[in-house]
Image: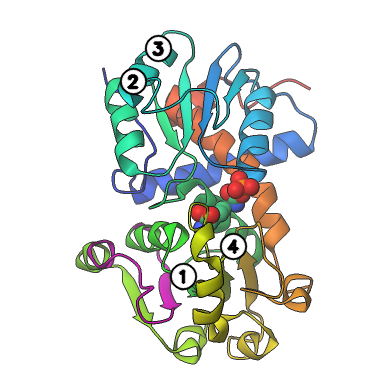
Amino acid sequence: MNKRDLLNFTDVSRVEMQAIFGLARELKRKQKQGIRHELLRGKGMALVFEKPSLRTRVSFEVGMAQLGGYAVFLGPTEIGMGSRETPADCARNLARWVDIITVRTFSEKVIEEMAEYASIPVINALTDLYHPCQVLADCLTLIEHKGKLDGLKIAFVGDGNNMVHSWIEAAEKLPISFAMACPKGYEPKAEIVSQARQNGAQVAVTHSVEEAVHGADAIYTDVWASMGQEMEAQRRAKTFRDYQLNQRVVAMAKTDAVVMHCLPAHRGEEITDDVLESPQCIAFDQAENRLHVQKAVMVWLLNGFKSSKAKGLKGRK
Ligand code: CP
Ligand code: NVA
C-alpha cells in the first residue's frame, strides 16, 4: 500500500510543498468566505499527544471538523506508550478505527515505529527533533506577508532545536536561506546541517547574532528550554542571555523584516514584550495558519492533490 506520512521533510518534494501552500491558501479563502469544503467527510483522526499543546491540538481538531471529519484526542496519560502498549501495537489498533494518526511525542523512534506499523498516514505534530507542521505554517505566513519565499533570508536566534531542524530541512527544498545564531554547544545537529548543505541548502550556523541577523527578511525565535528540558531552564536562561530577540537585534535586520515566533513565548526571556507586541511581529498570523496548512496536509495525505480539485473545492455555500 502506497500510504504517505509527514514525519519530516526528507521525503517531501519542493513541488509537494508548493502544492500544500496553494491548497492551504485555497482552503483558507473558502473558510473565510463561509464556503463548505468538506473534503474529508466522515474521516477520522486520532491525536496521540505525549506533550502539552494549545495551537497544534486545537488547529488539528478544528481543521478536521471543518473538513467534515472528526478527531479523537488521546492525551499524555491515556495510552501509556511504551509501558502499557508498544508504539507498533498502538498504531495497528488505531489504524482499524481511524484514517489518519497525528502524533506529538519525544523520540523519533516512537513516531517512526508508529508510521512503520500503521497502514494509514502518520503526521508529526512535534518531536524532540522536528516540527514540520509549524514550518509549513510559517512559510505560508511569509508568502502572505512578503508575497513570495524566493530569496528570503530567515535568521533564527536561540537554540538549535526541533524548529531549527525543520527550517534547515525546509531550506533544502525551498528557495530561502537560513542562518542561525546560538551559544556554543547549542548548535543544530551536525548531520542535519551537513545533509541539507549537501543537497544545496544555504544554511549558516554562527555564534554571532549580528552575523546571522544582518540582511534578514525574518527574525525567528523560540523558547530556550523546549518541552522535556524544563530541568535545564535555569541554566539555559543564563547561557542564552545574549541571544534574546529585542529591539537591538531587530535593528540589525532589514528595515522591513518581520519577527516570528512559533509560540508559546516566554516574554522577557527569548523575546521582549515590546518586540512580540510590535507591528512587525507576525506570530499570531503564524498560529492562525497552522489551521489552514494542516488542513491541506491532511487532504494531501488522504486524497492526494489531484482529487482535492476533483472533489470540488468548487464547493457549496
Ligand atoms: N507552536 C505550537 O506547536 O504550539 P503548541 O505547543 O501550543 O501546540
Ligand atoms: N521548541 C519548542 C517548540 C514548541 C512549539 C518545544 O519543543 O517545546
Question: Secondary structure beneath disc 4?
Answer: helix
Please state which of the two labelled residues, at mark 1 or mark 2, is closer to the viewer.
Answer: 1
Label 1 environment density (alpha carbons within 10 Å; few <14, some 14–19, many ≥20): many
Between disc 4 and disc 2, whose residue precedes?
2
Q: Which residue is label 2 attached to? A: 118
Residue at coordinates 48% horizontally, 9% vertically from top-left? 97
Disc 1 residue: CB within 8 Å of ligand 2: yes
Label 2 environment density (alpha carbons within 10 Å; few <14, some 14–19, many ≥20): many
> Seen in the image, is 259 located left or right of residue 316?
left
Cα separation between marks 1 and 3? 37 Å
Residue at coordinates 44% horizontally, 34% vertically from top-left? 123
Q: Nearer the viewer, residue 303 or 100?
A: 100
- The amino acid sitting under disc 1 is Asp
Q: Which residue is label 3 attached to? A: 93
**Extent of the magenta region:** 173-193
Question: Secondary structure beneath disc 2?
Answer: loop
> Seen in the image, is 190 located left or right of residue 226?
left
Label 4 environment density (alpha carbons within 10 Å; few <14, some 14–19, many ≥20): many
| Image location of residue 133, percent across then percent down | 50, 46
